[in-house]
Structure formats: C-alpha cells, structure tokens
Image (cartoon, rainbow, N blue to C red):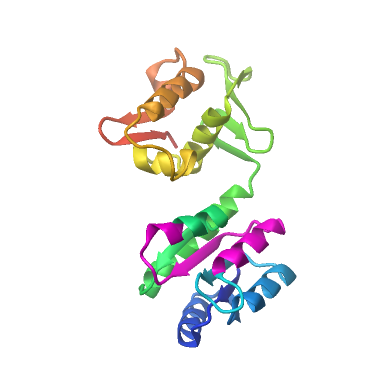
C-alpha cells in the first residue's frame, strides 16, 4: 500500500512518515500543497493524508484538484482547527475523513486501516448478504424468490432506497444509529428530528423482505438505536 503525506510542518510529516513506514506502508511526502498536487496526479496512491492549512495551495484546493482529475483514492484531511465549518468544507470537497490535531498516532493508524478497507470493498462491483445481491454499477438489486433455490426476483429501488441499501450492505451485521445513517445517506445538511429515515427503512423492508417468514428477513432494527442488515 502506497500513501502520500502532504504536510508543511516537517516534524509532523516526519512523525507520520516514520510511523506509517513502521506499519509497512510505502510513503511519499510533500511539504506544500503545490508539490502534493503534483505528486498526487503523477503517481498512483492507495491513500492521501493532507493538512488543510498549507502554503502555495490549501488542502481544500489539493482535494478538489485530485477529485476533478478523477482520482478516487481515500483522502484523510488533518486540521488544527475544531470549527465544524472547515471539516465540512473538506468533506464537501471530496475528503473521506478528517482528524483534528493534536492526535495520537494510534488513532491515525486506525483511520488509515479503516479507509483502506473501505476502499478495497468499494472496488467490488457487487455487494451481497445471504441471497440478496446489489450491483453497484447498474444500481439494481435482486433476491431469490422465497421458497425457490434458483428463481431470482428484481427489486425496484428509488435513488435514496438504493443509497440506503448500499450503505447498509457496506456495514452489514451492524446496527447503525439514525444520525450515522443521516450523515452517510442524506448528508450533513439534512434536518434531524424527521421520521424520513424510518419511512425509508419501512419502504426498503417491504421491498427486500416483503411477506417472507421471519428467518428470511434481512433488515434489522433495534428500538431506540437504529437499523442495519444481517450479515
């Protein structure tokens, strides 16, 4: 796995480089946004870690240019600020996660592993659990007809139903809170307090599980906690 660090504070960059090399990653370092953008576009990386406040080009500009060039590797942004506005700006620009300075290297290493796992999963063109299969290219879903070992039934999905089912399948086996589902499917600007998530889960359950017997039902719920899908 090859990682690019873009960090103008040389002590921090050296600290990250050494730690990641000890974790057996190949690491390149750039000390300003301009150099970072050049390296990011000239090479193939599995992950980019970039500071947001840098000379020549900001981390936000780096992220936007990398995404505009069609590069889809995970991006972890580092910020010394705690204001939610800067974090949201980074995420809106195309970052996948953020970490506020100061931080423990153990936390950064855990974020790196999580992003790399997620990236590897997203390279797959299908997601599945039991007999339910979701095609992430055509955005179509299908499942074996109840009681049949071979006959498949297509499941019609709206855009948001697809996004909700995709998120559940990427986190299968876990009950996720409404706030987590909101952030990943509806975005950070979605108004909390609405029952729209419950409505969409109900619709998805009707399409995926229908009138199937209890043992065949896949959509999970936990009162007061949230929703998920069986692994």
The quarter in which the C terminus is drawn is top left
Residue at position x 50%, y 57% from top? 89
Give the residue at x 28% y 36%: 225
Does 28 sit left or right of 228 as displayed?
right
- Closer to the camera, 52 or 147? 52
Q: Nearer the viewer, residue 145 or 158?
A: 158
* Residue 175 seen in the current view: no
Closer to us: 192 or 77: 192
Q: Report the side of 89 relative to 107 (left or right).
A: right
* Region of the chain picked out in magenta, as a range: 59-87
The single residue placed furthest to the left in the displayed view is 224
Quarter of the image containing the N terminus? bottom right
Tally of marks: 0
Name the residue rendered at 50%, 73% in the picture.
Answer: 53
**Position in image of residue 110 (x %, y %):** 42, 64
What is the quadrant of residue 138 in the picture? top right
Does 78 lie within the magenta span? yes
In the image, 58 versus 9, the foreground residue is 58
Where 101 sits versus 163, above or below?
below
Q: Is residue 172 left or right of residue 104?
A: right
- Image coordinates for residue 83, horizontal then vertical, percent: 37, 62
């Amino acid at each position: 796995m090859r990682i690019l660090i873009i960090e103008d504070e040389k002590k921090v960059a050296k600290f990250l480089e050494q730690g990641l090399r000890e974790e057996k990653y190949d690491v390149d370092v750039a000390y300003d946004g301009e150099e970072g953008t050049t390296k990011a576009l000239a090479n193939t990386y599995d992950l980019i870690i970039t500071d947001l406040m840098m000379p020549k080009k900001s981390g936000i500009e780096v992220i936007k240019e990398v995404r505009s060039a069609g590069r889809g590797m995970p991006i972890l942004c580092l910020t010394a600020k705690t204001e939610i506005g800067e974090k949201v700006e980074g995420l809106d620009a195309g970052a996948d996660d953020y970490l506020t300075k100061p931080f423990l290297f153990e936390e950064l290493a855990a974020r790196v592993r999580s992003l790399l796992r997620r990236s590897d999963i997203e390279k797959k063109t299908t997601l599945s659990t039991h007999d339910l299969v979701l095609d992430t290219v055509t955005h179509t879903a299908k499942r074996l007809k109840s009681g049949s070992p071979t006959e498949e039934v297509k499941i019609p999905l709206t855009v948001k139903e697809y996004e909700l089912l995709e998120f559940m399948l990427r986190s299968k086996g876990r009950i996720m809170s409404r706030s987590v589902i909101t952030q990943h499917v509806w975005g950070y600007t979605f108004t909390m307090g609405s029952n729209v998530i419950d409505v969409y889960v109900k619709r998805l359950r009707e399409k995926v599980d229908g009138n199937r017997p209890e043992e065949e039902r896949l959509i999970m719920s936990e009162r007061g906690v949230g929703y998920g899908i069986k692994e």
